[in-house]
Image (cartoon, rainbow, N blue to C red):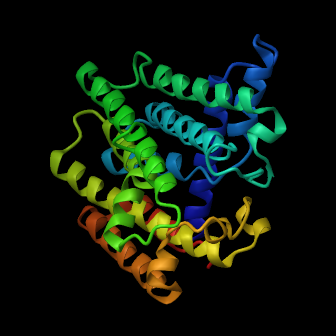
Amino acid sequence: MSDFSSWAARIQARAESTLDALLPPEDVAPARLHAAMRYAILGGGKRVRPLLAHGAGELFGAAAERVDLAAAAVEMIHAYSLIHDDMPCMDDDDLRRGKPSCHKQFDDATALLAGDALQSLAFQTLAQPGLCGDAARQTRMIHLLATASGSRGMAGGQAIDLASVGLNLSQQELEFMHIHKTGALIRAAVLLGAHCADAPDAEKLRAADRYAKNIGLAFQVVDDILDAEADTVTLGKTAGKDAKNNKPTYVTILGLARAREFAAELHADAVADIAPFGDAGRRLTQLADFITGRSF
């Protein structure tokens, strides 16, 4: 995996550099808002979504410079969601990526606005001229990210999550929630990376979509396992919070052993989706290994 590690480090560095260039400087008014935006998104996180976007970009032969922008847009949406999720009216967490949450470092109002501003900047970035060789496809990309972020995607999944506290959900109901809350943005990362290519192949797009759905769900299953087993230092956020808040998870519904088996099954399905494309899909295959292989 040394080759993958080197590639991932390069993509993570590209993501950091692109975000740094796109975000307004801290000394530009309103300075406190810009400082909060930069605090929340720079210098932390595994950049899983940019990695997936670039992995898909390689599968489809997209120019890395285009994928940089699409990946940054997805990461901005992800960062905004984390800011809002951590606030007292939502999950009420004081720690994110090993440092104080945005609302603790600044204040609730500034954190709320930082999330709002990152969301707007994501669509400003995705609408940049030259991101895609075809205007209609670029419009489709904007539509795709908007859908993944809204009530039929991430925001809707979070609403279901908040409404599910203390309830005994079935596995099907839990999957429906996480397909929206976590999976929608992971799927968007893969598909946006693919659409950065000129005339992406339709069959390959369908395979990439199936891969994204499987690996998006696997990501959440592993997150639930880690929340149950890992410590706060390892996670970079408060460990055991789901159990404390009486939230339904794959661990509470399936048990640890079956949750691990389910993650492995999803991993196998994701890898099988990409297998027909050989070496062109190796980064997505390696990312499936990386996502499901996070330390239990």
Q: Is residue 258 visible?
A: yes
Relative side of 35 to 22, left or right: right
Is 111 placed above or below 57 here? above
Q: Residue at x 39, y 49 (%)?
A: 184
Is 4 placed above or below 13 here? below
The foreground one among 131 and 267 is 267
For the image shown, how many numbered marks are present on the structure?
A: 0
Relative side of 171 to 255, left or right: left
Residue that extends furthest to the left in the rendered view of this protein:
203
Q: Where residue 205 appears, x then y in whole percent?
A: 23, 48
Q: Where residue 209 appears, x then y in whole percent?
A: 28, 53
Q: Please identify the quarter of the rendering in which residue 269 is found.
A: bottom left
The foreground one among 211 and 181 is 181
Q: Where residue 134 appears, x then y in whole percent?
A: 26, 22
The quadrant of the rendering that contains the C terminus is: bottom right
Q: Residue at x 41, y 35 (%)?
A: 63
Relative side of 178 to 110, left or right: left
Relative side of 37 to 137, left or right: right
Q: Is residue 186 visible?
A: no
Is 225 placed above or below 85 here? below
The quadrant of the rendering that contains the N terminus is: bottom right
The foreground one among 72 and 172 is 172
Residue that extends furthest to the top in the rendered view of this protein:
29
Q: Residue at x 67, y 65 (%)?
A: 241
Q: Where residue 173 appears, x then y in whole percent?
A: 34, 65
Q: Please identify the quarter of the rendering in which residue 262 is found.
A: bottom left
Residue that extends furthest to the bottom in the rendered view of this protein:
257
